[in-house]
Image: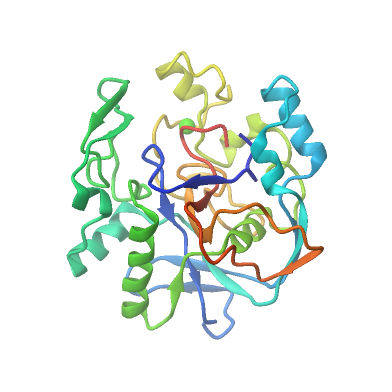
Amino acid sequence: MGPFVRCVSTVIVVAVAVTCLAIANQPDRQQTYTDKTTGMQFHRIKAGEFVMGSSREEQDAMAKKYHGGQRQDWMDDEKAHLVRLSKDCYLGVHEVTRGQFRKFVADSGYKTEVEANGRLSLALDEESGKFEEKEFSWLKPGFAQTDDHPVVWVTWNDAVSFCKWLSAKGHREYRLPTEAEWEFACRAGTRTRYSFGDDEESLAGYANVADGSARERFPDWNWAIRAKDGYVFTAPVGRYKSNGNGLKDMHGNVWEWCSDWYATYPTTEQSIDPRGPSEGSMRVDRGGSWGDRG
Ligand SMILES: [Ca+2]
């Protein structure tokens, strides 16, 4: 799966869902901003224009490499189109960590949707190395994590609740980024397959993906890249090289929630500050994860 591919979920995907945040109002136009409650760092992303989505050439190359030359249905959903973002925004440098999420839970008494439902979920379990049906949650993700790792098993509603709590605490308005803001910030002016270039084996220097370490643990992951990023499951945030906007882990570690409902991209020539459709059945998450190839 390529980096600018979209992922959609009504509930969390396999232990990989997290939020990155955009501050809605501008903190005095500084380049960086640190939230006092959580210590979260934000970088300013200047307004601008970019081509959102994948080019036909890129899609054809992916179809040839991974799908025996067959175009996939989802490829028509993310047609390249011009987008203009009229306002600067601030995006979290790192994925929200388990320690930061713990502060939210300790202060508010919040129960994540997965905990509240108490239902069994199917996910990869580190202990057995197999998919198991258990009561997984951000505290029991199925693999070892420290408070520096990204929080997982967080639904879109959980992520929005975290943003609301942070807004109330931080005297700024925090929200999930729109999908357009996320992609613009990730691309950082590039048009290559990844924000650092086209070579997927180079992902190991930029992100925690399904890699050579994961192949050793799960020999049937023969689709994973061969280079090693050093982690089978999640990695502490910020371990890898930044993109051009100084943001970390944009191509891996855990998928990141955006605010938009999922829909086929608009076909108009130019879209200004798109927020996605007003209703839908699935939300968008973006990036990549330890269990995907970027
Ligand atoms: Ca990895």
Residue most toward the top?
219
Residue 15 in picture, x, y percent from top left: 36, 40
Residue at x 64% of width, y 39% of height = 74
Give the answer, above or below, for where 98 lies relative to 220.
below
Locate the C terminus and report the quarter of the image it occupies. top right
The colour scheme of the drawn protein is rainbow
Residue 209 in picture, x, y percent from top left: 51, 34
> Could you say which is closer to the camera, residue 234 or residue 142?
142
- The quadrant holding residue 135 is top left
Give the answer, above or below, for where 98 lies relative to 130.
below
Residue 187 in picture, x, y percent from top left: 68, 54
Residue at x 71% of width, y 59% of height = 266
Left/right of residue 102 with respect to residue 280 in the rendered view: left
> Could you say which is closer to the camera, residue 241 or residue 44?
44
Residue 43 in picture, x, y percent from top left: 55, 67
Residue at x 46% of width, y 42% of height = 253
Left/right of residue 21 with respect to residue 29 in the rendered view: left
- The quadrant holding residue 86 is bottom right
